[in-house]
Amino acid sequence: MDKTIFGTFLLIVTVSSLLPLLAQSCPKATVAGTEPARSKSIPFSIEQRSTTVQPTPDGSTKTYERTEVTATDSEGRHLITSTSGASGPSSFRVDDPVAGTRTVWNTENHQAKVLKFPTAVPGRESCWRIPAEEHRFVRGEAQLGLYSISCQPAEQHQGPFCGVHGNAVEPLRDNSPEAKPSYEDCWRALTSGKLFETTEDLGVETIVGLEAHGCRSTDVASDGTHTRELWWTKFGTASRNVGISLRSVDEFPDRAGRTVKMTREATSMRLGEPDAEMFYPPDGYAIKTVQMEEVACGQASKPNPNAADSH
């Protein structure tokens, strides 16, 4: 069903990064011969509701709804929750760069899994994989959503999972002006640099109290017309900011040529530190700790078809 970039929560953060969809960059304090210190993130939380309207052969439609909450605290902990329908099951995933862990849990059982990220090895590349028992999908069980990790030699720059863990440091002084969303920001996020038949500037609108800039692309393909619309905001400063989608609309034909419409819109947004309890499983949940195993780097890249994401 998630056919386009709007099937995944579209989020780019230019401050600190934990997930592939978070790209963070800001001035970092460094000491000669050491890994740059991880700067504190801009904290926020956002709730979004997504709706998919799917036509059926008899001319009626089916509607699917999902609510997602995303939150980042100043230490860079990042939470994603997903709830199906009005009262369906919910799943939770937290990446914690302070502890060097990923924690997953859901409302279908009372067990949380804590995956410990590996430590880079001096002088050589190292590759890591979750234990074999975590490869298979068990209905109702929280899934780690991560199969393998490759780390550069410890002396080199590391990605978010292999770096030195611990508390973030205050960012360098920033005197740049306030961040403002632009058509160019929206276009880059919408198209990922791809060329479309037409791209429109939709101007500025206020959504959940924030200024957002809108854009739309239209592409006529052999199976029909694909239309994508995005409303993009930024907050922070010009050199240290968070960029995020507040509304997206995606219309495309299914295999029978009927138009499917997927809409995602922010329903609430809060700037500042999220509630700390959001980043931890509820009381009463059993905790299962998972350690990654080092393997030959050729093995680490072979995914298991039965492995599943945590959402």
Image (cartoon, grey):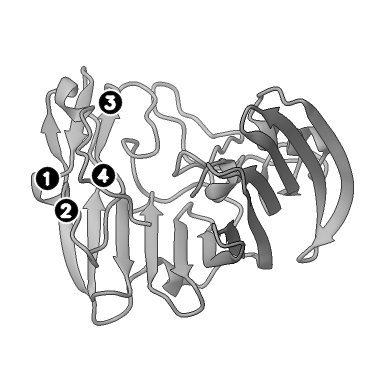
In the rendered view, would you say 170 is above or below 122?
below
Compute the Cα span from label 1 to label 3: 23 Å
Q: Nearer the viewer, mark 3 or mark 4?
A: 4
Note whether 310 is above or below 229 in the view shown.
Answer: below
Amino acid at the residue labelled 4: Phe
- Residue corresponding to mark 3: 154
From mark 3 to mark 4, how far is it between C-alphas? 14 Å
Q: CA distance from mark 4 to mark 1?
A: 13 Å
The structure residue drawn at horizontal position 61% and vertical position 62%, both measured from the top left corner, is 59
Label drawn at residue 131: 1
The residue mark sitting in front, 1 or 3, is: 1
Q: Give how far across and how far down residue 113 sits, in percent.
A: 23, 61
Q: Quadrant of the C terminus?
A: bottom left
Q: Nearer the viewer, residue 121 or 30?
A: 121
- First reached walking from the N terminus: tag 2 or tag 3: 3
Residue on which the image places disc 4: 117
Q: Earlier in the sequence, mark 2 or mark 4?
A: 4
Q: CA–CA distance between discs 2 and 1?
A: 8 Å
Indicate left or right for 138 with 46 as reference.
Answer: left
Q: Secondary structure at mark 2?
A: strand
Q: Earlier in the sequence, mark 3 or mark 4?
A: 4
Cβ atoms under marks 4 and 1 closer than 8 Å: no
**Of 283 and 246, which appears nearest the observer?**
246
Q: Residue at x 67, y 63 (%)?
A: 266
Label 1 SS: loop
* Labels in figure, total: 4
